[in-house]
């Protein structure tokens, strides 16, 4: 099979970090109870990633705990440009020459765009949430109109994207695995270079230790 699209998760896949946790850490930096709140934030992140609670709930609980500001978002977006997964960068020329690349994420366009720009992925190929702010520039949630909003958001976004098939989804979370389980992706590659989640690897066609393995799979598929 010759694959035509590589859809890539952002947090802990295209970049080595969890972007919303970075925003939370920055927003909490001057608080004495920062460690305690960060542990709770990470716990809620994991519940969302495992599919135990819906994304909307996981986000609203985290932003209510932390109340990040627009400047925290802007600073982290710049930092993420420097946190792109090394094995993605070393395989970028191959990937660009062989597949259409899209980012499908339960992260936020504002955080993803500078990193995407660095590797030449256009904004139209970013399927993610957008922050909603109040009048004091504090994050209060996500805009409901984004392509990944609601149940099975990543799957829905891929279904309506018009991205050419066959399509390979790469990611570390259950919502990434779900795109294949629900038929919006033809292959799911569990990406474990940064974090290994059993709820993702259990449903994987392939487990990739880095983008070298993703490349090898695509090359085999293209043969
Ligand atoms: Mg991820």
Image (cartoon, rainbow, N blue to C red):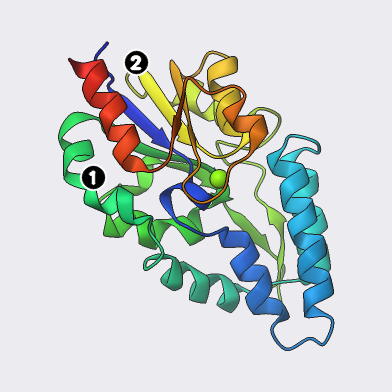
**Residue wearing tag 2:** 166
Q: Is 31 or 189 nearer to us in this picture?
A: 189
Vertical order, 223 against 118 (above or below):
above
Q: Quadrant of the N terminus?
A: top left
Residue 8 found in image quarter:
top left
Residue 196: percent from left, percent from top: 58, 42
Image-quarter location of ligand 1: top right
Q: Is residue 97 left or right of residue 66?
A: left
Q: Is residue 126 left or right of residue 223?
A: right
**Residue wearing tag 1:** 91
Q: Quadrant of the C terminus?
A: top left
Label 2 sits on a secondary structure element that is loop
Q: Residue at x 77, y 61 (%)?
A: 41
Label 1 sits on a secondary structure element that is loop
Residue 212 found in image quarter:
top left
Residue 81: percent from left, percent from top: 37, 65
Residue 43: percent from left, percent from top: 79, 54
Res 135 label? none
Q: Residue at x 50, y 42 (%)?
A: 192
Residue 210 visible, this angle: yes
Disc 1 versus disc 2: nearer the observer: 1
Residue 144 found in image quarter:
top right
């Amino acid at each position: 099979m010759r694959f035509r699209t590589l859809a890539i998760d952002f947090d802990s896949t295209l970049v080595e970090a969890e972007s919303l946790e970075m925003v939370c850490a920055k927003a909490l930096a001057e608080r004495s109870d920062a460690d305690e709140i960060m542990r709770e934030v990470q716990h809620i992140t994991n519940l969302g990633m495992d599919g135990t609670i819906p994304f909307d709930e996981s986000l609203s609980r985290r932003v209510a705990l932390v109340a990040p500001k627009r400047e925290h978002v802007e600073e982290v977006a710049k930092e993420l440009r420097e946190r792109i997964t090394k094995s993605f960068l070393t395989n970028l020329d191959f990937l660009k020459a062989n597949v259409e690349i899209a980012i499908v994420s339960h992260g936020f366009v504002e955080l993803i765009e500078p990193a995407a720009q660095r590797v030449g992925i256009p904004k139209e190929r970013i399927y993610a949430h957008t922050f909603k702010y109040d009048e004091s520039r504090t994050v209060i949630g996500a805009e409901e109109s984004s392509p990944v909003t609601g149940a099975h958001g990543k799957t829905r976004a891929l279904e309506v994207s018009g991205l050419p098939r066959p399509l390979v989804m790469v990611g570390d979370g259950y919502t990434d695995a779900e795109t294949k389980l629900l038929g919006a992706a033809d292959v799911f590659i569990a990406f474990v270079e940064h974090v290994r989640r059993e709820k993702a690897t259990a449903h994987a066609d392939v487990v990739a230790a880095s983008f070298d393995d993703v490349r090898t799979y695509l090359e085999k598929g293209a043969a």
